[in-house]
Image (tube, helix red, strand yellow):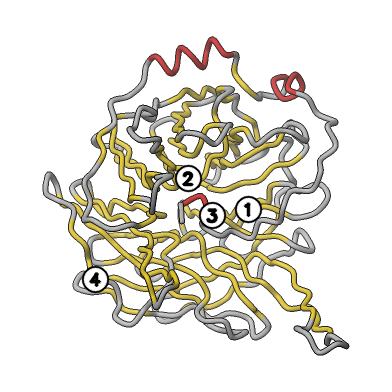
Amino acid sequence: MTVSALVRPRRRLRRLVATTVMASAVAVGGALPAAADEAAESAAQRWTPAKLPAGAASLTGVTKPDAATTWVAGFRLVDEGGGLDFQPVVYEKNGGGRWTEIPTAPGESGRINAIASTSKKDAWVVGDQKGYDPGGPIMAQHWNGRSWKSVDVPTAPDSTGGGLLSVSAVGPNNVWAAGWTQIQDSVTPDPDGGPPQIETHSEGIVAHWDGRSWKNVRVPQPYPSWALNSISASGPNDVWAVGSGYGDDDQPVALHYNGSKWSVLPTPPHGGVYGEFNSVVAKSPTDVWAVGRVLLDDKDRGHALVMHWDGKAWTKVATPETAGPMYGAAPAPGGIVAAGKTNDRVNGYALRVVGNRASSLGIPTDLPEGRTYAPWAVATDPKTGKATIVGVIENPQGYPDPMVLTGRI
């Protein structure tokens, strides 16, 4: 189980009509020339891998409650009677010390998909819907400075699955989370006595913590079937959630909350036949970044998609040719740091974006025995000028190892 196998509600891509070619993508800010990409690679950063406690695990989230502390979270694979199960896991590092595991809430199983904090005494992790019964709650846990405590998030009665993929904390009494739910539309009995045919669709969901409980928030429905992958708030009156709509022309989805209501922003022009947003960073109402993937034609496995909102419109940022899908992003001076995969999906990739320019941060590719880095999330510390990227080290011979890379940006 790799981090790239973290289930998001992705339908298999339909055969796309190749109406857009590379040249048109470059014209609207698509791929940088190969020479620029090679120049960026030559300035590769010196990344330091971390040594975490032993055990196969996938890391899906990272947060820095202060300059000296880093928490990473995800899930461990465990053997339950011959079958694999997931167990939530959180690791902590203080200053130059070693990584240690922080026990999560007792009795909880499942994946942690994201983590956020406001201080060393206030943090949240969110995960998947519990069990297999419709209407089951979504796992969430709160850190009070001493221990993790389960605080479930409710779901719709007709929800047959789903989860929260992102969490953003404005303050202890103002936390937002976003993800997806699978809604049952109909059940058709099999006349021959076999399993019934169940029709479902996906919907994006937003939940809000007000200091007392989690509540589901009503948001617009931009597509008949869609999902949210990330949420970010710059303040109580500026919250952004992004994802993807599903259909013949799957497109990025962006929702905004202005303190009183949620609205859908028009799909930004991305220069491809298909696009999706996987992560969003809201720095202010006039400085918002979204990253993800764009497919340039029906044979494309996905190039990096980086967009900037200036308060009025989206602008696409040109990215190196070899940059593939971006899964995580974090704020940095003048822009963001984003992490994901190369466009051939072979190696990990990280971008430093400043203004309208993106350059490679040189994720190492020379790991032994065919192993490769697969980044999923990133956090930054503007005071030290460092980024922490987490995910997995993919191992073709066995289970993945947790991945933590730290380097200057």
In what element is the residue under mark 3? strand
Residue in the foreground of this view, choosing between 9 and 203: 9
Q: Classify mark 2: residues with Cα within 10 Å, few (<14), some (14-19) or many (20+).
A: many
Image: 220 above or below 10: below
Q: Nearer the viewer, mark 4 or mark 1?
A: 4
Q: Are marks 4 and 3 in contact (CB under 8 Å)?
A: no
Q: CA distance from mark 4 to mark 3?
A: 26 Å
Of callouts 4 and 3, the N-terminal one = 4
- Considering only vertical position in the picture, is 22 above or below 315? above
Which amino acid, by three-letter code, is at mark 4? Pro
Q: Earlier in the sequence, mark 4 or mark 2?
A: 4
Q: For the point 31% across and 39% down, which residue is it?
A: 405
Q: Earlier in the sequence, mark 1 or mark 2?
A: 1
Q: What type is the residue that disc 1 sits on?
A: Gly
Tell me which residue sits at (88%, 88%) in the image. Answer: 191
Residue 218 horizontal/vertical position (percent): 65, 72
